[in-house]
Image (spheres, rainbow, N blue to C red):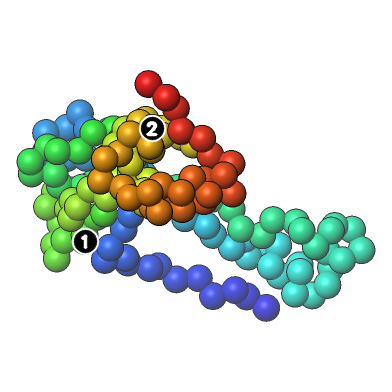
Amino acid sequence: MSVPRGAVHAKWIVGKVIGTKMQKTAKVRVTRLVLDPYLLKLALFGILMPRFPFFLPQFFNKRKTYFAHDPLQQCVVGDIVLLKALPERRSKHVKHELAEIVFKVGNVIDPITGKPCAGTRFLENLSDSENLTEADTTYLSEKLQELKVCSTDK
């Protein structure tokens, strides 16, 4: 039994910028999970059952590097970007262009509160916010206590 394998030409790709030293070009690394065909074959035929546990990982990270055209040179190393495939190659290696910067490095906003954070800590105290009502403050503090997240006081 063979596992079908085919080349997939993705039109939209999300990846992390790992280099910006070339003019108007960003080097982007894309990581995806790939099913190992050999382990899948062994698992399907029951060969793994006597020797290995069922939680043997069958998916592995596969990394690929793309070069993307960045006309405004707005990318910084560490940004998470969305790439769009070009209809034809721009150069020998450049096949994609920068569609949008999804997350800027160092600029992380909590989706629930809308406040800047670093890791699991907020950069500003939630009670200092003047646009929150008392009900919003109590609701947020209850949710943060459930998640065991605390805010730092300045």
Specify the quadrant that holds the C terminus. Answer: top left
Q: Are marks 2 and 1 in contact (CB under 8 Å)?
A: no
Identify the residue at the far top of this view. Answer: 154
Identify the residue at the far right of this view. Answer: 50
Q: Nearer the viewer, mark 2 or mark 1?
A: 2
Specify the quadrant that holds the N terminus. Answer: bottom right
Depicted 154 relative to depicted 135: above or below: above
Which picture quadrant has residue 67?
top left
Task: Evaluate whether residue 117 shows in this view.
Answer: no
Task: From the top left corner, tell me how far across and down residue 99 is, in percent.
Answer: 18, 55
Which residue type carries mark 2?
Asn
The residue lying toward the viewer, choosing from 7 and 60, is 60
Identify the residue at the far left of this view. Answer: 72
Task: From the top left corner, tell me how far across and down residue 108 is, in percent.
Answer: 34, 40
Using the image, tell me which numbered label, if any, was put on residue 125: 2
The residue lying toward the viewer, choosing from 80 and 54, is 80
Graded by Cα atoms within 10 Å as few (under 14), some (14 to 19) or many (20 or more), the crowding at tag 2 reads some
Which residue type carries mark 1?
Ala
The residue lying toward the viewer, choosing from 15 and 63, is 15
Which residue has dot 1 on it? 85
Using the image, tell me which numbered label, if any, was put on residue 145: none
In this picture, residue 74 sits left or right of residue 19: left
Which picture quadrant has residue 19?
top left
Q: Give the residue displayed 89% in from the left and 58% down from the top.
A: 51
* Earlier sequence position, callout 2 versus callout 1: 1
